[in-house]
Amino acid sequence: MNRIAKNINSRFLLLMLPAGLMAQPGEKSFLQAIVENGDTILVDNIREVIIFPQRTFTNQRDYLKYRRLIRDLKIVHPYAKVAARYLEELNENFIDIKTENEKKKYIKNIEEKIRNQFEQEIKNLTIRQGRLLIKLVDRETGNTSYELVKELKGSFTAAFWQALAKLFGEDLKIQYDPLGEDRLIEEIIILIENGQL
C-alpha cells in the first residue's frame, strides 16, 4: 500500500510539474534576410554606440563633481526636451493664428499648461541645475532663454528677467558651446540619449 501511494504521489507530482514551468514570453520579432548565392544572411539594425575616451580623475573631488554633473543632467535634460517640444508646437500653431491677441491668448494658455505641469518640480531645482537647464534649452531649441522670452513675451519682459538673473549672477543670454566650454556636458548628454548612462 505504501508503495502504491508513493507511485501515485510521484505520478501526480510529475503531472503537476509542467503546470509550474514557463518558457520565455512569446515576443515576436522579425528579422530581415538577404539571400546571396543561395546563402541566407540575417540583417538587423543595431543602435549606434558612441565611445569616448575613459575619464581619469586626479582626485576623489573631481570624480564626485563628474558624478554630480551626470545626476544633474539626468534631472534637467527631460525639461529641456519638453521645452523644445512646446516651442515646436507653438511655432506650428502660430501659422494658423492670425491676430496678435489670439497669439497672446495661445501663449498664455501654453504657459499655464506648462506651469500647472512643471512649476513645483522646476522650483525644486538647485541653482546648479537651473544653470544647466538654461544651457540645455539653448542646446535643444537653438535659441537662448533670453531670445525665447523676447520672442514670446516681448523685449521688456526679456530685459526684466535678464536683469533679475544678473542680480543672482546668472545670464539668460549664455549660449551652449558643445565644442568648447560645454564639451563635457555634450558628451554626457550623448551618452544619456544613447542609453549608455
Image (tube, rainbow, N blue to C red):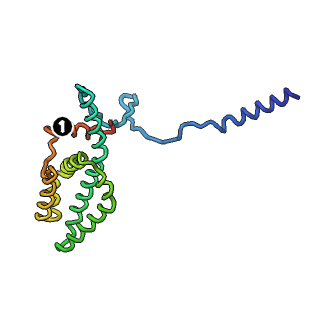
Where in the figure is residue 102, as x and y percent of width and height?
21, 73
Give above or below for 65 relative to 97. Answer: above
The residue that appears at 19% across and 47% down in the rendered structure is 135
Where in the figure is residue 54, as x and y percent of width and height?
26, 27
- Residue annotated with mark 1: 183
Q: How many marks?
A: 1
Is 140 displayed left or right of 120 in the figure? left
Which is nearer the eye, 191 or 115? Answer: 115
The picture quadrant where one finds residue 55 is top left
Which is nearer the eye, 192 or 66? Answer: 66
The picture quadrant where one finds residue 82 is bottom left
The picture quadrant where one finds residue 180 is top left
Residue 24 visible in the picture: yes
The residue that appears at 34% across and 37% down in the rendered structure is 45
Give the residue at the far front of this rendering. 167
Which is nearer the eye, 14 or 113? Answer: 113
Residue 143 visible in the picture: no
Q: Give SS at disc 1.
A: helix
Where in the figure is residue 77, as x and y percent of width and height?
28, 47
Quarter of the figure with the N terminus: top right
- Residue type at mark 1 is Arg
Give above or below for 68 relative to 127. Answer: above
Quarter of the figure with the C terminus: top left
Where in the figure is residue 112, as x and y percent of width and height?
29, 65
